[in-house]
Image (cartoon, helix red, strand yellow):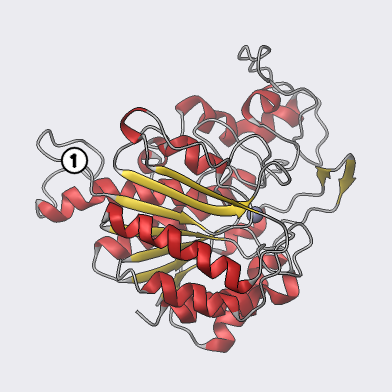
Amino acid sequence: MITIFSPDHALHDAPHEFLDGKLIAPHESPIRVRMILEALERADIGPIQSPRAFDLDPIRAVHDNDYLAYLAQAYERWVGAGGDAAAVLPSTLAVRWMSRRSVGPLVAPGYYSFDLSAPIVAGTYRAARAAADAALTGAALLLEGQRLAYALCRPPGHHAGSDLYGGYCYLNNAAIAAHFLGVGSWELADGGRSSQLSTPSSQLPARVAVLDIDFHHGNGTQQIFYERADVLFVSIHADPAREYPYFAGYADERGAGAGAGLNLNFPLEAGVTNARYLAVLEQALAAIADFAPRFLVLSAGFDTFGGDPIGDFALTADAYPLIGQRIAQLGLPTLVVQEGGYAVAALGENATGLLRGLCAM
Ligand SMILES: [Zn+2]
């Protein structure tokens, strides 16, 4: 199994996040990735590669142009207009009936974000691009015939929508990779003659399933693929009636238009045990098998672990190898994309456990 990792993740190191009415030290910090990387090296689980450098095209396929331009310049423009140099964090959010687009350097953050958990610092955009490149590199490896790759992404991505960031996420690494896998299969089919990202008139993208096993609902991934017939999104997560992201992730959100029926949410109660989780996973995997995708993208968060500071499930370290084994039994080429997980001391063991289980395929 190949891991893709970039040290550029450390360029994103937020000074704080706003949570439960308080400005606190961020749960999402560089040490998370360092802990996983050290555990992978100790476990000798396979080679670790740097990401290839991709241009913006595969990212533009998922995110809006004006959003990407905003992210690339947000910090410099904010500081240039007198914003606090510590980090970009908006005061006013564009919500519901008050959502006119405004691009002033100090107010655009409130247009392009949906919460206050995702500050932007000087290196955030470069780190987010490196994470997207890691996911794209993993997708390219699958297109080249690898069966399993692990993109050790940071910042995570599954809360980022086509034009909104939040929940520690800026670019949706899993969605970018899933789209790339779908259209990238054209290149395989025609021997590389057509562009990966143009649409040959006679061909449809390959089917891709995204399975999100982070503790939180992957609201961004859901939004990006909600009306698409070529991508199935399945998410197992804390019931949003009780947990973040609160305003999406309910079981009755089933997709729309061409994507009707292709969005499947499993919101769960607090205290979920290994046995309960594995039983729900069976239902999720059955839906994926029915869809018969060509590739699987696994949004892997470890905040389902019992000791996680912002989760309330009760999974133990023993769960992750079993989850990996069951997913491996789908027999699909699989790209694992790192999402959340904030019980830092346990992250290495939980990540290597999942990957070892997946390696059983
Ligand atoms: Zn999470």
Q: Does the closest atom of ligand 1 sit within 8 Å of the Cβ of label 1?
A: no
In the image, residue 207 lies at what x, y percent?
Answer: 27, 49
Q: Quadrant of the C terminus?
A: bottom left
Q: Amino acid at mark 1?
A: Leu
How many marks are shown on the rendered structure?
Answer: 1
| Up-down relation of residue 287 to residue 23 (above or below) | below
Instruction: Report the side of 74 relative to 330 (left or right).
Output: right
| Up-down relation of residue 116 to residue 144 (above or below) | above
Residue drawn at (69%, 28%), measured in percent from left and top?
109
Name the residue tied to disc 1: 204
- Pick the residue in front: 178 or 308: 308
Q: Quadrant of ligand 1?
A: bottom right
Residue found at the far right of this picture = 22
What is the quadrant of residue 315 in the picture? bottom right
Q: Quadrant of the N terminus?
A: bottom left
| Up-down relation of residue 91 to residue 6 (above or below) | above
| Up-down relation of residue 298 to residue 109 (above or below) | below
Residue drawn at (34%, 27%), measured in percent from left and top?
257
In the image, residue 179 lies at what x, y percent?
Answer: 34, 45
Residue drawn at (72%, 56%), measured in percent from left and top?
28
The reply to whether residue 37 is in sight is no
In the image, residue 273 lies at what x, y percent?
Answer: 66, 70
Instruction: Report the side of 306 relative to 72 (left or right).
Output: right
In the image, residue 205 lies at what x, y percent?
Answer: 23, 44
- Pick the residue in front: 283 or 156: 283
- Pick the residue in front: 149 or 292: 292
Q: Label 1 crowding class (10 Å Cα cut-off): few <14, some 14-19, many 20+?
A: few
Helix, strand or loop under label 1? loop
What is the quadrant of residue 325 in the picture? bottom left
Residue drawn at (71%, 67%), measured in percent from left and top?
31
